[in-house]
Amino acid sequence: MIAVLIAGAVSTLISLFGTRFLIIFFRTRGHGQPILGKEDHGPEHHMSKQGTPTMGGLAIVIAAFIGWAAAHVRDIAFSDQAMIVWVGVLGMSTMGFLDDWIKIRKGHNRGIFWKQKNYITMLMSFGLAWWLVGTTGVDESITFVRAGDLGFDVPAFVWVLWAGVIIWATTNAVNVTDGLDGLAGGSALMGFGAFMIIGYWAFRNPEVYGSVVNPLDMGVMAAGFAGACLGFLWWNAAPARIFMGDVGALGIGSALAFLALTLNTHLLLILICGINVMEAGSVAIQMGVFKASGRKKRLFRMSPIHHHFELAGWPETTVIIRFWLISAICVASALAIFVADYTRVVG
């Protein structure tokens, strides 16, 4: 437990002061976020945010890594599984950083990777899933709250495809959610908190979760990300003084996916990231209705769905807080299911 607390405390402090440094650094250099206008079918009501410093996600990823590393003074082994996860998170964050930097240089909210980014991140996701299953003892079954609960044991190549889709979908879902001040960071904080509890619980109960490889190390990683999101939210809360950018959204999304895969809670991720599923789903539904109607009708005023409620008259802070409440309900439900399953097994 002390290692988990160290990771959370260290990452919170580094993120808190590191984000402040980034605000000053980018503001003095004029590196601000461009906003899509009416001509690009963007949220015109957000044009007042034009020029707000971005790429604050750098502080989240760096703080989470340092917090995770610092926790290993408690004689926790650096697991190969965690190393692979970090390579994946840093790889996705680098992709986001490149896109953010190009947006700033071009002065437009669509970087050069606007269309290609999805394909690149998808290939990265499958490659990382293959690496994970090929070099660690990760359980090769489709799971809900623990290995063996569903009985879906699949061949390695099927698991790689399944895991790759989870990594890619979660990464992009968090990126879609990152459209209001603090929305993505606040919901991610709750998700990482859930995985911190699940990881530590699995560590303390190996007789039930023996198939989880290095659960404490993964729980410490979740604590590091939770603390990093907490420190970042101090500056990102509405009205935001800095945005996380794609560098943060892609890093956070991939970290959540990897934690679900390594802790054998694949399908529970749907609840833990319930708000992200809702946001990404609204985009898919909007596109489906629009194309099916011959590009004449839209179900929502604007997607992702948080913009729909803004255009319906909800203040931005109201949307954020209500979406946080939905996220909290989803995460609490996920933890309740996890604990209920444990109680049933040991009972």
Image (cartoon, rainbow, N blue to C red):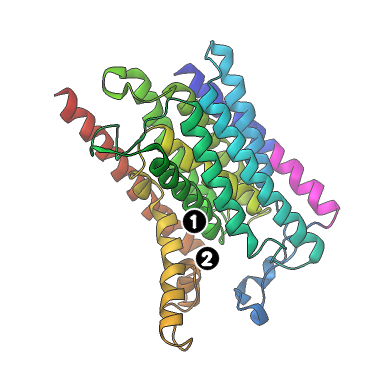
Seen in the image, is 14 located left or right of residue 279?
A: right
Residue lying at the far top in this picture: please name it.
75
From the viewer's perspective, tell me whether residue 108 is left or right of residue 184: right
Read off the residue under disc 2.
316
Q: Judge whether 276 appears above or below 34 on screen.
A: above
The CA span between labels 1 and 2 is 20 Å
Q: Quadrant of residue 298?
A: bottom left
Residue 244 in view, yes or no: no
Q: Which residue corresponds to the image point at 32% horizontal and 21% vertical from the top-left?
A: 210
Rate crowding at label 1 as few (under 14), some (14 to 19) or many (20 or more) other CA atoms within 10 Å. Answer: many
Residue in view at x 74 percent, y 62 percent = 103
Give the numbered dot on residue 173: 1
Q: What SS does tag 2 mark?
A: helix
**Which of the two marks, 1 or 2, is nearer to us in this view?**
1
Does residue 57 appear left or right of residue 155 in this picture?
A: right
Label 2: how many Cα within 10 Å (few below 14, some 14–19, many 20+): some
**Residue 134 place in picture, x, y as percent:** 49, 31
Write the start and end of the magenta stretch as one range. 18-30
Which residue reaches farthest left? 347
The secondary structure that dominates the magenta segment is helix
User: Type of residue at label 1?
Assistant: Ala
Q: Nearer the viewer, residue 188 or 102?
A: 102
In reply to whether residue 26 is colored magenta, the answer given is: yes
Residue 200 visible, this angle = yes
In the drawing, does residue 290 fall left or right of residue 224? left
